Image (spheres, rainbow, N blue to C red):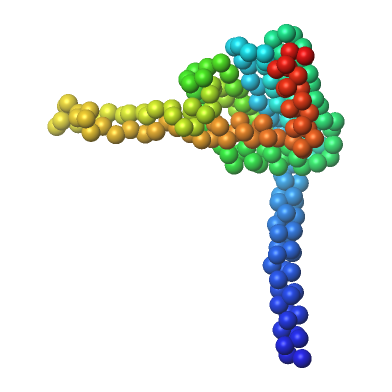
Amino acid sequence: MILTLAAVAAVVAGWLLFFVRPESARYRATQRVANSASVLHLGMRVTYDSGPIASEEYRMADDNGRSTSTYRITGTNGKMYTITTPPVQTFTVPFFFERIVADGIWKITDRPPRGDKNAHYTLYVSQTVQNQHGSRTITFTDPHYWATTAGRQYEIHLDKNKPTPSLVHLSGTSLADKRYETLVADFRGFGTPGFRAKVADVQAAVRAHR
């Protein structure tokens, strides 16, 4: 009888550990988003100097849990394709907002043209909460360059006792910042599998000049 009760207790404990806790965490995350009512506007626009694509843009908006999203691509031949999800009561955009905030959307800054300069990226985010408003717009080229190469930044501090600093031993700070590439990947990965499949279809159509 004692062994039977111990076995039942172990099963219950395992169920609580592997099922109840994750579900509870998901519930708390949903409640956190639901209780932080706000109006959100997010987006990424990419323009190209050459190639079949002239521009493409991801736009997301949410008004207190009512979300919509749009992808638009324009070819150099003038053709434009637009994919829009109708407004629906969901936390898709607020959850995406939390993700890009965690990935540094409020912390990155404009960067000068470097690396592959054919594509020009503009990320923007806007949030209004209880009459408080904040927004950012960031521009840069080649997110992979800024994530991996970028070079180093040096600062020279002169000492009155050593007016000529040693440049041989000068150290610097790397300017590489993976957040640029991560945020671009976030926007390109946004949406349901169906939404992303339609995006891929129109991208292929523009590249094929159809």
Could you tell me if residue 71 is visible in this image? yes
Q: Residue at x 58, y 18 (%)?
A: 119
In this rendered view, identify the residue nearer to me: 24 or 80: 80
Could you tell me if residue 35 is visible in this image? no
Q: Residue furthest top?
A: 77
Q: Residue at x 56, y 16 (%)?
A: 118
As drawn, 205 above or below 64 = above
Q: Residue at x 36, y 28 (%)?
A: 153
Residue 8 image point, x, y percent = 76, 80
Q: Residue furthest bottom?
A: 1
The part of the image, by quadrant, that contains residue 128 is top right
Residue 161 image point, x, y percent = 14, 32
In this rendered view, identify the residue nearer to me: 63 or 82: 82
Residue 92 image point, x, y percent = 75, 40
- Report the quarter where the N terminus lies: bottom right
Q: Looking at the image, how many numbered discs can be counted on the residues?
A: 0
In this rendered view, identify the residue nearer to me: 105 or 159: 105
The part of the image, by quadrant, that contains residue 200 is top right
Q: Residue furthest left?
A: 161
Q: Is residue 171 left or right of residue 145?
A: left
Residue 38 image point, x, y percent = 73, 38
The part of the image, by quadrant, that contains residue 19 is bottom right
